[in-house]
Amino acid sequence: MLPAPNYVSRAPWEYDIAPFKLVDNVYYVGNKSVSAHLFDTGEGLLLLDTTYSQTAYLLFESIRELGFDPREIRWIVHSHAHIDHFGATRYLVEKYGCKTYMPAADLEFLTTKAELNWCGDLDIPYEPPYDTYFDVDVAINPGDVLTFGNVKMTAYCAAGHTPGTMAYVFELPGGLKAAMHGGIGMNTLTSEYTKKHNLGNVWRKAFIDSLNRLYGLEVDVVLGNHPAQNDTFGKLERQTETENPFIDPSEWNRMIDFLRNKYHQRMLSDPL
Ligand SMILES: [Zn+2]
């Protein structure tokens, strides 16, 4: 049993896990709590989320263990602006000058609305321009299509967990489509959180509306935003030379359906 998430800053080593390949040019370099995915684009490395600042050394080691060099990371794309997904970005930017991408609607979480980036909730210091603050080079909007070497990425609105949360679909060089819903956690939709931050019904409505729009996307490989959310490690255990459970063209829609049901149950039991 893992300690609660707010222990990541106090015992990051508890979250260490060996990196591994999922499919094609996509690798898992996150930890037991939160995902980070590395794409070898042929023209440099693309990193999707960076985990906590306190687990940055685990991230660096994971990248090296796979035979890559962190200095080859050219681009860092973020699923949303919560500290467990952007915590180590500052290190990478300071050391290697990576280009950073963040959903446009989450930019203010790094500046004027830092109370929403979850640092305070996890007792992690955050005071721009210090701590884990970094400048965003590219703001991403729904519909944006970006090319990173041999990987083409399309951004879709997956708002709700935060206003800017994105779902990204990655067209891989081998032909598979891998996708991540960037924030399926309903921890920001509780009545307590909603009232504390004066959100009204806006985030809740955005969450179910975006799920409805995301249903039906063609996806071969679901990438977890947190490994527990898509049974990343269970799939790894079942992965063999001939079977790859990460490839499952029905998983995306099953996940969206599951989330819609869970959402309705949660909201019924926790009205505003
Ligand atoms: Zn989050």
Image (tube, helix red, strand yellow):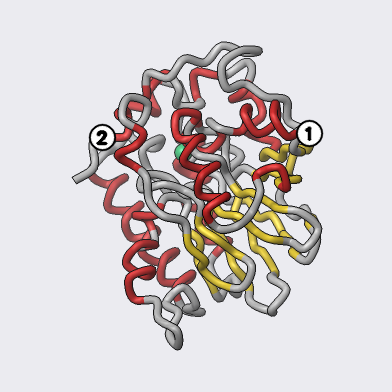
The percent coordinates of residue 194 (x first, y second) are: 40, 28
User: In which quarter of the view is residue 154 placed?
Assistant: bottom right
Q: Would you place residue 260 above or below residue 63 in this image?
A: below
Instruction: State the residue position of label 1.
Output: 137
Query: Looking at the rendering, which quadrant does residue 146 occupy?
Result: bottom right
Front residue of 218/209: it is: 218
Q: Amino acid at mark 1?
A: Asp
**Mark 1 Cα within 10 Å, few/some/many (few <14, many 20+)?**
few
Image: 186 above or below 52: below
Q: Residues within 10 Å of mark 2 (few under 14, many from 20)?
A: few
Circle number at residue 59: none
On the image, the x and y values in percent for residue 120 come to 42, 18
Which amino acid, mark 2?
A: Ala
Q: Residue at x 65, y 55 (%)?
A: 156
Report whether the residue tagged 1 is closer than 8 Å to ligand 1. Answer: no
> Is residue 191 something one can see in this rendering?
no
Helix, strand or loop status at disc 2: loop
Look at the image and tell me in which quarter the C terminus lies: top left
Q: Residue at x 47, y 78 (%)?
A: 248
Residue at 53% of width from left, 45% of height from top? Answer: 206
Indicate the position of residue 155 as horizontal and vertical percent values.
69, 54
Which of 224 and 251 lies nearest the eye of the viewer? 224
Q: Which residue is painted at 50% across and 66% down in the image? A: 222
Front residue of this view, candidates 19 and 7:
19
Q: Return the residue at label 2.
A: 4
Position of residue 128 measured from the top left corner of the image (x, y, whole percent): 62, 13
Q: State the CA–CA distance, disc 1 to disc 2.
A: 33 Å
Mark 1 / mark 2, whichever is N-terminal: 2
**Side of 271 where 81 appears, left or right:** right
Looking at the rendered structure, the secondary structure element under dot 1 is loop
* Vertical position of residue 4 compared to residue 72: above or below: above
